[in-house]
Image: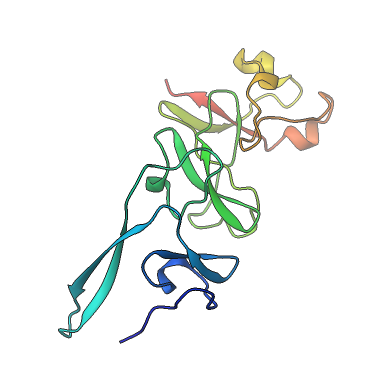
Amino acid sequence: MSTCRRRKRPCLRDTMCCPANRCSNNICVPDVDGFVSERNPNTDGALSPLTKKKGRKKEVGNPCLRSSDCLDGLCCARHFWTRICKPMLREGQVCTRHRRKGNHGLELFQRCPCGDGLICRTLREPGTQLAAVSGFNFSATSSRYSSGLSSGSPSSAVSKARLHVCHRTK
């Protein structure tokens, strides 16, 4: 039976820490939201601790483990070396299309998927401006945690050749 790690002990993930603690910067620290601890029998009959998070769903910028930790309209995505709640992408915002499932290894600033009713598609005409393609104002969509288009010249066809944008499904 494995034991949990107490406060101020090294860790790699939240599940390594004892109840009412979480892993932050590779150290078990008290969890400010709190936990409700339960004990359930293992397959070998021993008791193992399970933790269930209590409290409210997380808001934009709050640390998370999975998207279900976040409010509706948000997902849990990588931001540097942590995971935080970020907004789902809206129509016209730049998205990431993964060719293979699980091919997210090098993304330091992971994007959320496109929101409901939207799909991530390649921008068809590399020479046209993005706002003209979707009729959407990109400068109004950028935020601290979302991935709106921040810069780039309209003449940079090479950089836009593989650009993907959230579009309405037909």
Q: Quadrant of residue 151?
A: top right
Q: Nearer the viewer, residue 166 or 74?
A: 74
Q: Residue 143 at x, y = what percent?
A: 64, 30
Q: Nearer the viewer, residue 20 or 88?
A: 20
Q: Quadrant of residue 52?
A: bottom left
Q: Nearer the viewer, residue 104 or 6?
A: 6
Q: Residue 24 at x, y = what percent?
A: 55, 64
Color theme of the render = rainbow
Q: Which of the image's four quarters has the C terminus?
A: top left
Q: Is residue 48 left or right of residue 41?
A: right
Residue 135 vertical position relative to residue 100 in the rendered view, above or below = above
Residue 55 vertical position relative to residue 93 in the rendered view, above or below = below
**How many marks on residues?**
0
Q: Residue 15 at x, y = what percent?
A: 40, 69
Residue 84 vertical position relative to residue 52 in the rendered view, above or below = above
Residue 163 vertical position relative to residue 68 in the rendered view, above or below = above
Tell me what residue is drawn at x 69 percent, y 24 percent.
Answer: 125
Q: Residue 71 at x, y = what percent?
A: 41, 37
Q: Nearer the viewer, residue 157 or 9?
A: 9
Tell me what residue is drawn at x 56 percent, y 71 percent.
Answer: 27
Q: Is residue 113 left or right of residue 56?
A: right
Tell me what residue is drawn at x 34 percent, y 59 percent.
Answer: 35
Q: Quadrant of residue 1?
A: bottom left
